[in-house]
Amino acid sequence: MKDSFVSFSIKKWSEDDRPREKLIAKGKSALTDAELAAILIGSGNREESAVDLSKRILASVNHDLNNLGKLSLKELMTFKGIGEAKAIAIMAALELGRRRKDSEQPILPKISCSSDVFQLMRPIIGDLEQEAFWVLYLNNANHVISKKQISLGGKTSTLVDTRIVFKHAIDLGAVAVILAHNHPSGTIKPSTADKRLTEKIKNGGEILEVKLLDHLIITENKYFSFADESLL
């Protein structure tokens, strides 16, 4: 008579115990390290589930992911239930995590005044021969989390789709924006169109709770700030 075999594949678990379903329902941050590892390996062995096996592997490195990343292919394969394919999956995931950390960009400087915006944007648009419209997206500490070119036009104007401005704000989770565009002519006096666009974005931001902090007109050596001139 053959011994009965109890499968510990994740597919056989109750829905409450499935880390994949937990990730979908609650988000990746809700999962433990062992549950994330269990998703990678998919199944355990005859005696333990994928989560229990992952817990044992993590315990062997004192629950230190950096130490886990140092394990060789052969060392990972010493754990019952971890074959070559699963060991490779673990190593690949940890290597991706390491590369992601290495590629992280430092947060851009905090904006405390219009001069900060000028110093940031002048090298980008100050000497352009075409009008370019950019938006700085800020968090609640006034740190720039992203800067994006919204449009590029001719020598005297550029069209701006305000929907794109706010779509990026929502996608980035920004709480404030600063507008910036250049005048190739060298004049920093805002046009009627500049004023209308500023008002339109300001009003749209109030509805979406994205505050317009400033709008700068930038040339190579000087700038005009709507906020400094009390035009917001």
Image (cartoon, rainbow, N blue to C red):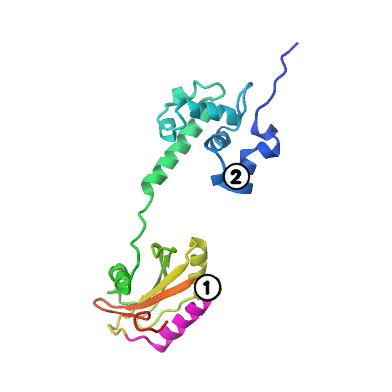
Q: What residue type is labelled 2?
A: Leu
Under mark 1, the amino acid is: Arg
N-term-proximal mark, 2 vs 1: 2
Rendered-image quadrant of the N terminus = top right
Residue 90 is left or right of residue 125, and the answer is right
The residue shown at (47%, 25%) is 60
Q: Would you say 44 lies left or right of 78 here?
A: right
Tell me which secondary structure the magenta stretch mostly adopts: helix
Q: Residue furthest toward the right?
A: 1
Q: Where is residue 123 in the image (x, y as percent from the top left)?
A: 28, 68
Residue 163: which numbered mark, if any?
A: 1
What x and y, as percent, mark residue 17? Answer: 66, 36
Residue plotted at (48% across, 78% down): 202
Q: In which quarter of the image is the C terminus?
A: bottom left
Residue lying at 42% horizontally and 65% vertically, measured from the top left: 138
Residue range highlighted in magenta:
189-206
Query: Does residue 190 belong to the magenta stretch?
Result: yes
Residue 150, by quadrant, is: bottom left
Give the farthest residue toward the bottom: 192
Q: Is mark 1 on a helix, strand or loop?
A: helix
Residue 23: mark in rendering: 2
